Image (tube, grey):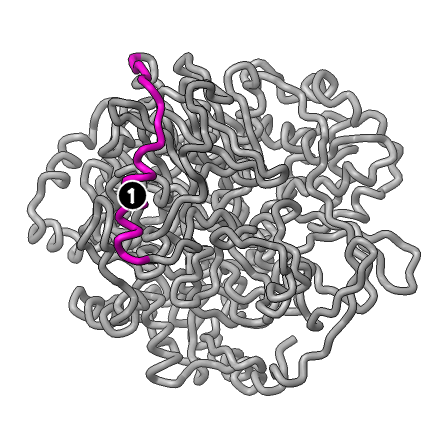
């Protein structure tokens, strides 16, 4: 139930609904798509990335002199959690062919393909296996399967949505292998939504020119991730799993190859070393950095650890100046602020409206453009809706979905969303929901090629931790696709590499070299990374935790 | 708002902590000074990492819920569960049949169900857990898959089950069998896979990969958009 102060605006939404339904049924475009020029203008003025202090120059490391997202640059210009001299690397605690860091869907896909290629895999993860952003993805996964669609159109949509900054070889792999990715998932037992004749139900997404979004209700990511997790657990002979053990540094050998990693056990606080012939980073993104103080849709563990340790080891980053804000984060009620309200809602016909119940943007612009339009409506035009605790957002008229597609569509298509709002007393089937952009995705990451290789031999990266696939803006449904296509590729190419690799003497010297540069900048010794977990403990409590030493944000 | 926050007392490990009213259990624990390293995950109700057992003031009943989706109440007594160490048999999905034999061989324990409905009552997703266990017992894989579709594998059902059934894992098997074997073939997909194997799109894709920016932009902004099939 919405408070009295918001009721008047809701009445207007109800009143204009039948007119807006007519517009949809007429088949006309309900709001004009922006031209290239209009997109440029709105992004420059309203996208959070374009604020004067949103980016700053990084002063050390492979991308020195480049402008990165300020919070990322701050996180990179830090000391290590460990002192290399505390480790005897002649006796590693674990040895493996392929080390996979991060157990979301990319890590699972990589582990499975490496195992199938005949090598041993050690899969390590910060929390439990499957605890990842992959598990939380709702709306869908893209693949050009319909007869009026093709990988060529998918390519065009992805590269245009990314403002033509995407690496072409990566987009080619992503889009041309997408149908096979869907088939692979289906064979592992993912239950994609089907029409009675067996064809996949496909919907649109922001920036797509065809109906291309495959889904599993609005638990798409969970359906995929849990299925792959189950399969990984079916192969215990060659896939060993270590949980609750985030990686805190990479290990190199005397020829400069990445040759393993240092783990930190979150519960008993021990450090362990791993020697590996090839290492795959599939650690996900950075939502928990709360860039520009935004709330986030991301998992508790999404703290950018993969790019941080890779950078320290000398890996080049790409597009780490670019942040994706999802247009529709919940902004009311307060318990779910920042939570994802899937783009599938707009694919199904839900319309964003201002306080006067007016349409102000096409519902399916690419995410950065759509988010910028929401911000403009709220901050410049003052046409947002205020909540009792002084947040502001725009309506997403969800009841329209049932009116367009038939009664029961909302409940059947987005049960997770209905459940989420119902838990906090909002019935999205009969009432609109209030939304505002929320920090969602790390567009950039460690630069890879189509084999998931980085500029350091032995180091492979897949999924959100990588950079180049999506340019500076990812389209809906291309992240689930990314983690499957490039997860599989990383597993395949890393295991090939591991078969021929000879590992030399292990060392952590790169940490000393990097820290020398950090020290020259005069950075305080308490600044360390990776962050591992965010810190939500109030200062007043911290002041009394007298014997606790804070390392980065983790005690 | 901030000047008049009402506080409630929660009890963690026997100790009382004052926290603002309206917080979820996860946020309340952090407000009280606990940095969580287990019993916490996506914080949005999708991963099942934060299953929690609690008791409310003046009530004898043990309740269960997700810590990220449950709001604290005054006098709430909390116990976090790191995870449920439930059994998960190893199987080769390509060698199973999508019928009762797969269930008998891998999850014979489901046949111990006493139909007490405790699992259904405890499920934070409000799923008909006992009904899908009964479907498994009948070998109705599709029904079990459908009823368990929204399961987030928090394990609270298994934790409270007097028959020691691992409901959420057995349902995972049912969904995999259904997804692999029981859904009708997607002819569109089969056709597209054949086209790709025949390299039908390779030439056009190569052209796009090598296209100059100006031409690529023209092509993008002039592409035809066909979005609605209603």
> Residue drawn 54% across and 17% down?
B94
Closest to the observer, B194 or B145 = B145
> Residue drawn 75% across and 43% down?
B156
What is the chain identity of the residue bearing mark 1?
Answer: A
**Residue B219 higher or lower than B30, as above or below:** above
> Residue drawn 33% across and 77% down?
A376
How many numbered marks does the figure carry? 1
Give the quadrant of residue A205.
bottom left
Residue A363 in percent (x, y) is at 37, 65
Residue B17 in percent (x, y) is at 75, 65
Residue B57 inside the magenta-drawn segment: no
Look at the image and tell me in which quarter the C terminus of chain B lies: bottom left
Closest to the observer, A257 or B111 = A257
> Residue drawn 67% across and 19% down?
B102
**Residue B139 higher or lower than A131, as above or below:** above
Residue hosting label 1: A514
Look at the image and tell me in which quarter the N terminus of chain B lies: bottom right
Q: Give the range drawn in magenta.
A: A500-522
Mark 1 surroundings within 10 Å by alpha-carbon count, few (fewer than 14), some (14 through 19), many (20 or more): many
**Badge 1 element:** helix
Residue B69: in sight, yes or no? no
Residue A120: in sight, yes or no? yes
Closest to the observer, A426 or A230 = A230
**Residue A341 higher or lower than A155, as above or below:** below
B76 horizontally vs A133: left or right:
right
């Amino acid at each position: 139930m919405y408070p009295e102060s918001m009721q008047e605006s809701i009445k207007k939404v109800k009143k204009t609904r039948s007119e807006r339904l007519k517009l949809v049924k007429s088949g006309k475009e309900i709001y004009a798509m922006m031209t290239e020029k209009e997109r440029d203008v709105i992004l420059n003025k309203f996208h959070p990335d374009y604020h004067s202090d949103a980016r700053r120059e990084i002063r050390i490391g492979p991308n020195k002199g480049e402008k990165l997202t300020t919070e990322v640059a701050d996180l990179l210009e830090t000391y290590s959690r460990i002192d290399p001299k505390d480790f005897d690397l002649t006796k590693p605690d674990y040895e493996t062919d392929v080390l996979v860091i991060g157990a979301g869907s990319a890590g699972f896909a990589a582990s499975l393909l490496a195992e199938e290629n005949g090598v041993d895999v050690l899969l390590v993860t910060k929390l439990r296996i499957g605890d990842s952003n992959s598990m939380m993805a709702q709306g869908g996964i893209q693949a050009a399967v319909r007869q009026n669609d093709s990988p060529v159109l998918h390519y065009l949509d992805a590269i245009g949505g990314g403002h033509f900054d995407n690496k072409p070889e990566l987009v080619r792999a992503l889009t041309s292998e997408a149908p096979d990715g869907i088939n692979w998932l289906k064979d592992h037992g993912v239950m994609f939504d089907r029409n009675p004749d067996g064809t996949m139900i496909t919907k649109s997404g922001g920036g797509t020119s065809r109906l291309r979004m495959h889904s599993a209700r609005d638990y798409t990511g969970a359906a995929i991730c849990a299925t792959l997790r189950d399969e990984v657990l079916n192969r215990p002979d060659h896939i060993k799993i270590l949980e609750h053990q985030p990686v805190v540094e990479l290990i190199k050998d005397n020829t400069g190859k990445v040759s393993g990693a240092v783990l930190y056990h979150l519960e008993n606080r021990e450090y362990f070393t791993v020697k590996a012939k090839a290492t795959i980073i599939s650690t996900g993104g950075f939502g928990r950095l709360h860039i520009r103080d935004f709330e986030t849709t991301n998992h508790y563990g999404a703290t950018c650890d993969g790019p941080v340790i890779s950078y320290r080891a000398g890996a080049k980053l790409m597009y780490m100046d670019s942040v994706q804000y999802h247009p529709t984060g919940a902004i009311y009620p307060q318990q779910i602020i920042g939570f994802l309200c899937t783009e599938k809602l707009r694919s199904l016909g839900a319309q964003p409206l201002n306080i006067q119940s007016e349409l102000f943007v096409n519902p399916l612009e690419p995410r950065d453009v759509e988010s910028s339009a929401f911000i403009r409506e709220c901050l410049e035009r003052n046409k947002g809706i205020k909540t009792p605790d002084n947040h502001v957002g725009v309506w997403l008229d969800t009841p329209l979905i049932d009116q367009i597609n038939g009664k029961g569509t909302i409940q059947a298509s987005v049960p997770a969303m209905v459940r989420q709002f119902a838990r906090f007393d909002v019935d999205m089937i009969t009432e609109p929901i209030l939304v505002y952009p929320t920090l969602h995705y790390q567009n950039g990451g460690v630069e890879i090629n189509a084999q998931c290789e980085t500029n350091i031999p032995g180091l492979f990266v897949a999924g959100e931790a990588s950079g180049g696939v999506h340019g500076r803006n990812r389209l809906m449904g291309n992240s689930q696709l990314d983690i499957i296509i490039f997860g599989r590729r990383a597993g395949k190419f890393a295991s090939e590499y591991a078969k021929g690799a000879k590992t030399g003497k292990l060392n952590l010297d790169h940490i000393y070299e990097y820290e020398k540069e950090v020290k020259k900048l005069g950075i305080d010794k308490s600044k360390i990374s990776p962050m591992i977990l965010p810190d939500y403990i109030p200062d007043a409590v911290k002041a009394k935790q007298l014997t606790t030493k804070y390392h980065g944000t983790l005690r | 708002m901030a000047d008049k926050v009402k506080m409630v007392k929660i009890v963690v490990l026997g100790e009382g902590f004052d926290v603002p009213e309206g917080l979820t259990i996860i946020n309340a624990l952090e407000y009280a000074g606990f940095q969580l390293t287990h019993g916490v995950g996506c914080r949005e109700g999708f991963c099942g990492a934060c299953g929690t057992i609690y008791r409310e003031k003046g009530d004898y009943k043990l309740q269960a819920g997700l810590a990220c989706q449950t709001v604290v109440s005054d006098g709430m007594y909390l116990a976090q569960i790191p995870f449920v160490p439930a059994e998960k048999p190893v199987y080769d999905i390509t060698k199973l049949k999508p019928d009762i034999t797969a269930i008998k061989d891998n999850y014979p324990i489901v046949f111990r169900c006493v139909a007490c409905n405790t699992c259904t009552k405890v499920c934070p997703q409000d799923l008909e857990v006992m009904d899908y266990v009964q479907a498994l017992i009948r070998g109705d894989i599709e029904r079990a898959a459908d009823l368990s579709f929204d399961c987030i594998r928090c394990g609270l059902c298994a934790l409270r089950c007097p028959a020691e059934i691992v409901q959420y894992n057995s349902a995972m098997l049912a969904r995999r069998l259904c997804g692999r074997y029981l859904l009708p073939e997607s002819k569109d997909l089969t056709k597209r896979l054949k086209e790709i194997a025949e390299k039908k799109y390779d030439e056009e894709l190569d052209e796009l990969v090598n296209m100059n920016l100006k031409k690529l932009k023209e092509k993008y902004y002039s592409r035809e958009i066909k979005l609605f099939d209603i």
